[in-house]
Amino acid sequence: MGSDQRPLAIALMGPTASGKTAAAIALAKAHGGEIVSVDSALVYRGLDIGAAKPDAVEQDGVPHHLLDLRDPWQTYSAAEFAADATAAVQGIVARGGLPILAGGTGLYFRALLQGLSAMPEADPSLRAQISAEAASLGWAALHAQLADVDPLAASRIHATDPQRIQRALEVYRLTGKPISYWQAQPGTARLPLRVLKVILAPAERAVLHQRIERRFDLMLENGFLDEVRGLRALPEMAAVAAPLDLPAIRAVGYRQAWQFLDGQGSQAEFRDKGVFATRQLAKRQLTWLRGELDARWFDPASEMGRLQDAVSLFLQR
């Protein structure tokens, strides 16, 4: 039997604030790699400080792909990501480089590595209708509607996750079948790679919480609120009727900053809400990561050497 000739790639996963950016750059420099961002916030122009987007200095000469693809008033789907990421990976392989898929957006990883089910495309008018319903009734009420028509999806989607609630209701209303039905159907072709999955996460949850808190405070020191003020001042953003429903502004931290600048609460309350929301994001990411049974876990504080060794051994096969 012939050996597996598929190109090699590294999938570097982990919760927010676990140190994925620095680790990915170190791996890329050590092994001739290029980084493909797997992060739903980094695709948006203008989401820099609050999304921890690496600037030119932090990138340290390592090519990065899938940053700044859309304006913050636009949308970007998992299917678009899969197509763009596939093209980026193919280019890296053609140049003889090592694709390093780095980020924390589980849906994007699944779309790229496992393929997507054949669900209908987004319907802007129906999405606007669902958003209007949410503005009137609240997302909790729409989550209850979802539970009536698709209990399985509702059990997987948190009542405070408007993007996924909206998509699940949209699919049901467009097709008459629940999104869980479509997700169970055969998907598109997987990316033809041999992938080493590694997860970077502190062994102790308290350590991750400390990292999240320190990073959020550093973002505030670096002008996060001024960044959001700049987004609010854009004419295209001012023309959006419900900016808090935009995927970009739903990104963790940005929603809380937007609400604070709308006059909701004190700056101290905003800071606490931002830290709490980031912790909740990390909790959801860790829940997803525990389902990646073929991945290896490494603690960023003590096991970076082991991570490098594991990658080196994989590449020597």
Image (tube, grey):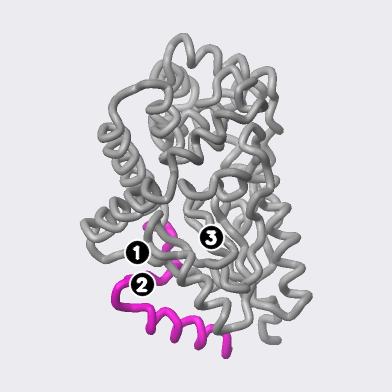
Examine the structure image and report whether residue 306 is included in the region drawn in magenta: yes
User: Can residue 194 be seen here?
Assistant: no
Q: Nearer the viewer, residue 112 or 274?
A: 274
Mark 2 lies on residue: 298
**Which quadrant of the figure contains the C terminus?**
bottom right
Say few, some or many: other residues with alpha carbon within 10 Å of mark 3 (under 14 / 14 to 19 / 20 or more). Answer: some
Mark 3 lies on residue: 54
* Marks 3 and 1 close (CB-CB < 8 Å): no
Corner quadrant of residue 98? bottom right
Magenta-colored span: 290-317
Examine the structure image and report whether residue 55 is included in the region drawn in magenta: no
| Label 3 to label 1: alpha-carbon separation | 19 Å
Mark 1 lies on residue: 201
| Label 1 to label 2: alpha-carbon separation | 6 Å
Above or below, 97 relative to 122 = below
Image coordinates of residue 151 in percent, x first then y, are 43, 28
For the point 34% across and 71% down, the residue is 300
- Check disc 1 and report its element: helix, strand or loop: loop
